[in-house]
Image: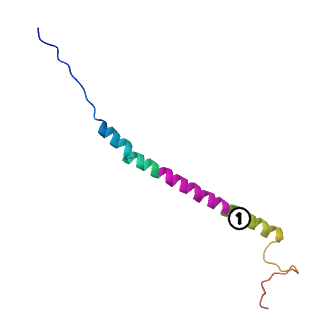
């Protein structure tokens, strides 16, 4: 009767450890994407602030009257006549 053979399977933990200590290219790309997203959020916030300021300036201009008028209500542009 033949003897049963046993198969032993070994796994390399050095490769797994290397993957954990050095980020994989996919993980590095995902981290870079997160940084870009955060930067874009900051840019959008800044643009929203500029937009709000411009809207406020436009409101103030309208509340002061239409066009460029001096304190007498006359247009500040002089015509040649």
Q: Which residues lie in the magenta part?
A: 33-49
Specify whether residue 56 is painted magenta.
no
Label 1 Cα crowd, 10 Å radius (few <14 / some 14-19 / many 20+): few
Left or right position of 81 against 45: right
Give the percent coordinates (x, y) of residue 76: 80, 83
Q: Residue at the location (83% across, 80% down)?
A: 70
Residue 46 inside the magenta-drawn segment: yes
x, y percent for residue 50: 66, 64
Query: Mark 1 sits on what residue?
Result: 53
Task: Classify the position of the C terminus by image quarter.
Answer: bottom right
In percent of the image, x 77 and y 65: which residue is there?
Answer: 59
Q: Give 28 or 77, whichever is nearer the viewer.
A: 28
List x then y, in percent, for residue 63.
82, 67
37 and 16: which one is in front? 16
Q: Is residue 75 above or below residue 81?
A: above
Task: Write the residue at 85% across / 81% down.
Answer: 74
Instruction: For the N terminus, give its image quadrant.
Output: top left
Q: Position of residue 38 (x, y in %)?
A: 54, 53
Tell me the quarter of the picture where residue 4 sits: top left
View extreme (right): residue:
72
Residue occupying the far top of the picture:
1
Reply above or below: 10 against 3: below
Q: Is residue 52 left or right of residue 41?
A: right
Foreground pick, 14 / 65: 14
- Which sits in the foreground, 26 or 72? 26
Badge 1 element: helix
């Amino acid at each position: 009767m033949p003897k049963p053979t046993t198969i032993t399977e070994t796994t390399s933990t050095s490769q797994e450890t290397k993957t954990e200590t050095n980020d994989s290219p996919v993980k590095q790309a995902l981290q870079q994407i997160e940084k870009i997203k955060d930067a874009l959020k900051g840019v959008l916030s800044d643009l929203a602030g500029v937009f709000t300021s411009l809207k406020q300036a436009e409101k103030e201009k309208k509340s002061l009257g239409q066009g460029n008028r001096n304190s007498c209500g006359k247009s500040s542009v002089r015509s040649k006549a």
